[in-house]
Image (cartoon, coloured by chain):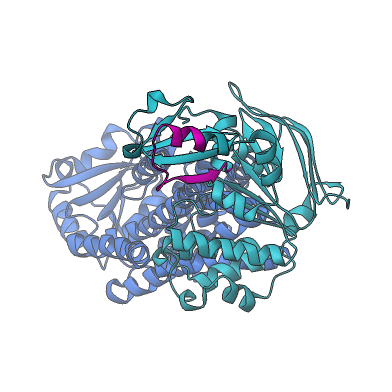
């Protein structure tokens, strides 16, 4: 009987959503427009500035940098202090750093495929007092659009999950639909399960369509496993749908629900590393970002797509998402009221 | 007398500042249509919603087929709320089928569709239904599990006269099947036509209960004579009190012969005289007062 009732509610909710053309349209159109906009605006480059990393190890002293002092005075080049040399080499591979210099070991790294790398190398060699050892790396360029797309997909999931479940349940509660269902043999567990699964299916179908659809035109980086990415997005969707259930557990006013959902979604959108890296930002902000499911979905998806990370590599994010999903589901179900 | 299908014993619902239901008791024999009447705020919807399982009572007992209400009651009860929204973008057929799948047993859906006159609207979106069509669909939903006990909470509120009459016919056909109905309504004519027994509630209590005829006989032994105001030139000269309302003079009397004789003595024409018995409207106002309720 559970499955019969579950599928009856699931099918009806799916039909309701799919026939609401404006809702489906916005769910698909919004992320496509954002992605297309970024692809157009940044037209392939991560940024227009030249960036050179300088390794600042413990043993770095004045005499080490003397050889590149003139180079460090060069205008229009941003010099970035580097503490993690391995992470910096990956950035050179991805064209996110044009060159990396270790003054202590007297080595520098450039990407042979990077035009910017070629130019900054020319500038550096003309100013050097002491020769440095050249190290070549290679790797495909990671554009800003490659970097930002996992976050945009995750952000779209967040809006769909929070508003598609939270707002809809509050609307049903307000107009008496939930009260009508309460008078049937349907249990809260059956009803909430159907809502979660319905939204999960819709989110995943839409995300897959957007991912492969926009990839046809933009062709962004995807070095990891598609299945791993699917699992990360599915888990992220469950966690954010559950968060929507927490919001919708008792509220009876659509206005209150809308305000609360906006209060949750806007900080998440800006503080979860969707648009810019949180590296180097205020530690309090970084701690706050850890609380948001969107942070973990974005970070895990980005690692899979750009770094080719496996599920084990992103296990911390998956663990957080699982814990958050269980916690939110428990709170949402415990406090849920039909009226 | 057979065992009651539903028995309510000393039901109490206490909200922080309001005693919504204050010791309500009644029982429903199988196959009867029981009307629960009362002004706004009397506590009838709260009472019915406690019976339906929507609210939990502060105290009291509800027995269905001699057992406390539970899963069985939920499977065997059909409920039509005062106002229920239906899902947008879903057709009448899909709505009925969805509700049918929520119950272990179902009525014959095709027969239900035909009986509730929904055949022509089956593929119509719920949003496009008229008031009457919508109420018929809500009734069909209440009947979808072939219930033994049916709750109808103000089912004809807002309907035009034709739709109301049509709805009464539907309820009569359900009664003819031997179903037990609990009906709440503001319309006294509706209660008089449909209900075998009524209870009038006010301030959370049942203040009177019985068949409509019993209650009228218990509370009234008079009739009302009505005359156009223009035919009564000097009403002050009459040896009894009169009540003027919208151009009509009403005289309440237990002795019609004597009253007519008095009117003739005062040279009042009886050409337009009308005599009407007391009805449930009169009883309702008599018992609950005439002040406006929220």
In the picture shown, does residue A300 fall above or below A210?
Answer: above
Q: At x 40% / y 62%, what residue is drawn?
A: A306
Find the magenta span and give its range.
B260-279
Quadrant in which the N terminus of chain A is drawn:
bottom right
Q: Position of residue A239 (x, y in %)?
A: 54, 51
Q: Residue at x 28, y 54 (%)?
A: A97
Q: Colour of chain A?
A: blue
> Which chain did the renderer colour cyan?
B
Q: Quadrant of residue B129?
A: bottom left
Q: Nearer the viewer, residue A103 or B31?
A: B31
Residue B176 place in picture, x, y as percent: 70, 66
**x and y percentages locating residue A137 in the rendered image:** 34, 63
**Residue B265 visible in this rendered orientation of the protein:** yes
In the drawing, does residue B129 fall left or right of residue A316?
left
Q: Residue at x 32, y 33 (%)?
A: A61
Residue B40 is at least partly visible in this image: no
């Amino acid at each position: 009987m559970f499955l019969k009732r579950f599928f009856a509610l699931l099918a009806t909710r799916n039909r309701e959503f799919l026939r609401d053309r404006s809702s489906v349209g916005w769910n698909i159109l919004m992320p496509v427009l954002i992605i297309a906009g970024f692809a157009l605006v940044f037209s392939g480059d991560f940024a227009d500035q030249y960036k050179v990393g300088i390794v600042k190890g413990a043993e770095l002293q004045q005499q080490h940098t003397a050889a590149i002092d003139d180079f460090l005075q060069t205008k229009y080049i941003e010099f970035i202090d580097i503490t993690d040399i391995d992470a910096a080499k990956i950035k050179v591979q991805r064209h996110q750093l044009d060159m990396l210099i270790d003054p202590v070991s007297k080595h520098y790294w450039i990407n042979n495929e990077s035009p910017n790398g070629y130019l900054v190398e020319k500038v550096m060699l003309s100013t050097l007092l002491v020769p440095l050892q050249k190290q070549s790396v290679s790797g495909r360029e990671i554009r800003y659009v490659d970097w930002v797309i996992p976050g945009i997909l995750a952000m779209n999931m967040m809006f769909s999950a929070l508003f598609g479940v939270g707002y809809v349940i509050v609307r049903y509660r307000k107009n008496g639909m939930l009260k009508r269902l309460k008078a049937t043999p349907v249990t809260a567990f059956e009803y909430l399960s159907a809502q979660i699964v319905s939204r999960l299916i819709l989110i995943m179908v839409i995300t897959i369509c957007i991912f492969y659809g926009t990839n046809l035109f933009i062709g962004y980086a995807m070095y990891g496993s598609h299945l791993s990415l699917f699992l990360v997005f599915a888990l992220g969707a469950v966690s954010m749908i559950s968060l929507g259930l927490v919001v919708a557990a008792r509220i009876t006013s659509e206005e209150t629900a809308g305000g609360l959902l906006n209060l949750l979604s806007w900080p998440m959108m800006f503080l979860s590393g969707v648009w810019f890296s949180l590296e180097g930002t205020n530690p309090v902000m970084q701690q706050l970002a850890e609380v948001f499911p969107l942070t973990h979905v974005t970070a895990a998806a980005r690692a899979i797509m750009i770094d080719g990370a496996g599920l084990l590599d992103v296990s911390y994010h998956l663990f957080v998402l699982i814990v958050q999903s269980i916690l939110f589901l428990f709170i949402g179900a415990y406090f849920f009221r039909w009226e | 007398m057979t065992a009651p299908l539903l028995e309510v014993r000393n039901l109490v619902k206490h909200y922080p500042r309001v005693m919504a239901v204050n010791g309500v008791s009644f029982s429903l024999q199988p196959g009867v249509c029981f009307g629960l009447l009362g002004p706004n705020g009397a506590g009838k919807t709260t009472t019915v919603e406690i019976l339906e399982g929507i609210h939990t009572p502060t105290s009291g007992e509800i027995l269905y087929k001699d057992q406390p209400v539970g899963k069985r009651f939920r499977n065997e009860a059909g409920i039509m709320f005062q106002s229920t929204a239906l899902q947008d973008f879903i057709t009448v057929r899909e709505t009925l089928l969805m509700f049918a799948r929520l119950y272990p047993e179902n009525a014959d859906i095709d027969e239900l569709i035909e009986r509730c006159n929904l055949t022509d609207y089956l593929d119509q979106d719920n949003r496009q239904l008229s008031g009457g069509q919508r109420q018929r669909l809500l009734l069909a939903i209440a009947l979808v599990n072939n219930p033994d006990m049916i709750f109808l909470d103000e089912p004809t509120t807002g309907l035009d006269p034709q739709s109301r009459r049509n709805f009464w016919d539907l309820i009569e056909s359900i009664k003819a099947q031997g179903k037990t109905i609990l009906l709440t309504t503001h319309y006294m004519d509706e209660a008089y036509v449909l209900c075998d027994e009524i209870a009038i509630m006010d301030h959370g209590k049942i203040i009177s209960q019985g068949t409509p005829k019993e209650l009228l006989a218990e509370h009234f032994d008079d009739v009302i004579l009505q005359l156009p105001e223009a035919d009564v030139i000097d009403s002050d000269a009459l040896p009894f009190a009169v009540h003027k309302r919208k151009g009509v003079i009403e005289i309440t009397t237990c002795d019609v012969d004597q009253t007519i004789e008095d009117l003739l003595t005062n040279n009042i024409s009886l050409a337009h005289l009308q005599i009407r018995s007391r009805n449930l409207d009169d009883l309702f106002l008599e018992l609950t007062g005439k002040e406006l309720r929220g």
